[in-house]
Image (spheres, helix red, strand yellow):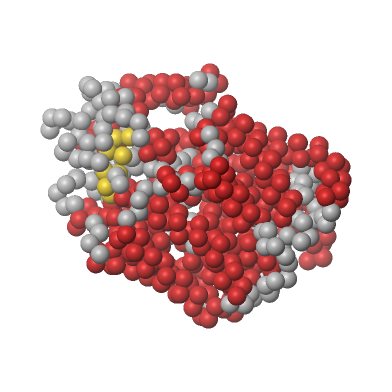
């Protein structure tokens, strides 16, 4: 870390207040995601569609077929690339990134994403388990850990921004009625798992001699939303500077391993797509990692290797993870801030936790996710099922889903490209053991709730 | 820092020891960008305290609070912050936007 002790102009910034609307990526994910949905709707309402720009590689079995597809559609890919480049450049520039670093980085990311997407469309891809999320992750990890990329390229590998944008777009493909119907069960299941996981990690951590703040930071990382929760709680409880990197390293190691393990474990256990998605939602820690696993499981379902549909896996995961777990991060932070200031550091600080912290830390992109869902659901209410399938899906929902898939591939690839295991802080044996205890309990309880207690609920999702 | 310092100005966010710029945190916390970000809402505006080697909320306050150099007015703070962003962006368009919506 650069020594900036004497650099006054880098010291603490004033409160964001309304400036959060353009200085936080959550809001930019809303502007971009909702903006695309609104444009898609306007075109749809005028009898046309964003279908042309939402191009994706077609299924292929021979390379000449693939070549023909690209020869026939190269203009669509170029325009789509320019669209992504334009909207991301505007957002990232507003956030303070440099255009000259982002543009070449995104060119690299997009080209590699096209290759991975095309590979996933190969008719033999599922024979060799070449699921795009896993391929993206594997290629990214190989490039960043074995070959090495220039550091400035990281400017375009914005994992969190891409996944948040993708989640807002996903909202447009998920009926709001489904959120209302399945949301309460998702919240109940997620809350049980979150509380138990947190308490296990915290209790084991304390027994192993960890500082309370580190134990709480690790606990939140395992119980709520991975790295984002870990740093949120680290700040709320005033953790030591080295606690956050320890939690980050531990979460990343577990989360990346789980991406590869969970889909195939669920398949081996013969879980349907909805049940598997719910289990992944309760067992994965970070949103982006979980989506990689859930999307993989959904792809297995679309190939017929798993009962159910691809959407069931992704929607069940989303309901558990985004609706059931992520929304509570502010409450976790508020409660732990109260405990920290009144119990752990009494007299050290005069800070008084404020209930407003629940809002400050609320993952705002979820608002965009819900609004997108509500908008498309309202648009769809005037259509019969047949008309919905014949008109709304191909012209509105389908293209948005394809754009979402692109955003997710950018994200999955970026996970691999930014995960450099050598650079992660040494987690230490005790923190790793404490977190692992919670992760194992998390997986077991998540399985019982998803595959036994709420099995029929997730099995019948969208029926 | 004398005891007469207004309480509102004793928050860590105003302290010269706190670093809560997203870019700084992403560089300081290796791996943060792999599955998260320094620009997310959940982080709020927490930062690293170089004095205590802690990661407190910007709304925290400590007896060891140390003002930047001298007491600054809200307007001075705003101008300084604006200059910080303009320096980073090197963009006149953004500067105009900042002027328009800020201060």
Residue B1 position in % (x across, y down):
15, 30
Q: Residue at x 51, y 62 (%)?
A: A258
Q: Classify residue A157 as left or right of residue A231.
A: right
Quadrant of the drawing holding the N terminus of chain A: top left
Determine whether A194 is above or below A397 in the image: below
- How many discs appear? 0
Residue A431 rendering spot, x and y as whole percentages: 32, 59
A220 in relation to A462, above or below? above
Residue at x 56%, y 62% (from the top left corner): A260
Q: Residue furthest top?
A: B92
Name which residue lies at 55% across and 42% down.
A147
Instruction: Indicate left or right for A410 with A95 as reference.
Output: right
Does residue A287 appear anywhere in the picture?
yes
Tell me residue A408's x, y (percent). 62, 51
Q: Quadrant of the C terminus of chain A?
A: bottom right
Q: Establish if A49 lies above or below A11.
A: below
Residue lying farthest front? A146
Left or right: B85, with A408 as reference point: left
Image quadrant where residue A350 sits: top left
Closer-to-camera residue (A251/B52) = A251
Residue A404 visible in the current orientation:
no
- A169 or A213: which is nearer to us? A213
Could you tell me residue A50's position as x and y percent? 77, 45
Left or right of A347? Residue A95 is right
Which residue is farthest left?
Answer: B3
State the residue in front, A169 or A430: A430
Residue nearest the observer in this picture, A106 or A31:
A106
Query: Residue visible at 73% across and 71% down?
Result: A304
């Amino acid at each position: 870390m650069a020594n900036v002790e004497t650099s006054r102009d880098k010291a603490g910034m004033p409160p964001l207040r309304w400036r959060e609307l353009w200085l936080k990526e959550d809001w930019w994910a809303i502007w971009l995601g909702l903006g695309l949905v609104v444009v898609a709707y306007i075109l749809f309402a005028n009898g046309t569609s964003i279908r042309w720009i939402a191009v994706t590689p077609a299924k292929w079995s021979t390379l000449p077929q693939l070549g023909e597809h690209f020869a026939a559609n190269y203009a669509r890919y170029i325009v789509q690339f320019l669209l992504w480049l334009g909207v991301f450049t505007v957002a990232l520039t507003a956030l303070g990134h440099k255009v000259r670093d982002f543009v070449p980085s995104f060119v690299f990311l997009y080209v590699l994403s096209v290759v991975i997407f095309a590979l996933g469309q190969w008719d033999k891809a599922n024979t060799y388990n070449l699921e795009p999320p896993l391929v993206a992750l594997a290629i990214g990890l190989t490039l960043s850990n074995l070959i090495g990329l220039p550091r400035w390229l990281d400017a375009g590998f914005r994992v969190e921004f891409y996944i948040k944008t993708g989640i807002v777009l996903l909202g447009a493909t998920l009926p709001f009625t489904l959120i209302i119907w399945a949301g309460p069960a998702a919240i109940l299941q997620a809350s049980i798992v979150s509380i138990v996981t947190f308490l296990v990690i915290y209790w084991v951590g304390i027994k192993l001699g960890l500082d309370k703040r580190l134990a709480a930071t690790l606990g939140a990382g395992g119980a709520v939303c991975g790295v984002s929760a870990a740093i949120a709680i680290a700040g709320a409880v005033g953790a030591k500077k080295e606690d956050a990197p320890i939690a980050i390293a531990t979460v990343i190691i577990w989360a990346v391993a789980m991406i590869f393990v969970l889909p195939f474990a669920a398949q081996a256990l013969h879980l349907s797509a909805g049940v598997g998605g719910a289990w992944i939602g309760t067992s994965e820690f970070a949103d982006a990692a979980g989506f990689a696993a859930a999307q993989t499981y959904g792809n297995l379902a679309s190939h017929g290797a798993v009962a159910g549909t691809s959407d069931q896996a992704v929607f069940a995961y989303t309901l558990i993870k985004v609706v059931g777990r992520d929304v509570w991060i502010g409450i976790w932070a508020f409660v732990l801030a109260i405990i920290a200031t009144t119990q752990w550091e009494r007299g050290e600080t005069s800070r008084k936790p404020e209930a407003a912290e629940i809002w400050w830390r609320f993952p705002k992109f979820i608002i965009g996710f819900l609004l997108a869902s509500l908008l498309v659901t309202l648009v769809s209410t005037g259509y019969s099922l047949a008309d919905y399938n014949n008109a709304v899906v191909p012209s509105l929902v389908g293209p948005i889903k394809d754009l979402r898939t692109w955003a997710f591939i950018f994200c999955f690839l970026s996970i691999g490209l930014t995960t450099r295991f050598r650079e992660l802080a040494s987690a230490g044996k005790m923190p790793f053991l404490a977190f692992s205890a919670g992760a194992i309990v998390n997986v077991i309880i998540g399985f019982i709730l998803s595959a036994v207690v709420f099995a029929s609920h997730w099995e019948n999702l969208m029926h | 820092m004398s005891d007469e310092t207004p309480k509102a100005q004793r928050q860590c966010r105003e302290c010269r020891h706190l670093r809560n710029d997203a870019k700084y945190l992403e560089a300081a916390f290796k791996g943060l960008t792999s599955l998260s970000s320094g620009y997310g809402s959940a982080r709020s505006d927490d930062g690293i305290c170089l004095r205590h080697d802690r990661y407190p909320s910007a709304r925290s306050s400590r007896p060891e609070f140390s003002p930047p150099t001298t007491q600054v007015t809200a307007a001075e703070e705003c101008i300084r912050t604006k200059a910080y962003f303009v320096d980073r962006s090197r963009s006149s368009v953004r500067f105009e936007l900042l002027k328009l919506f800020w201060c």
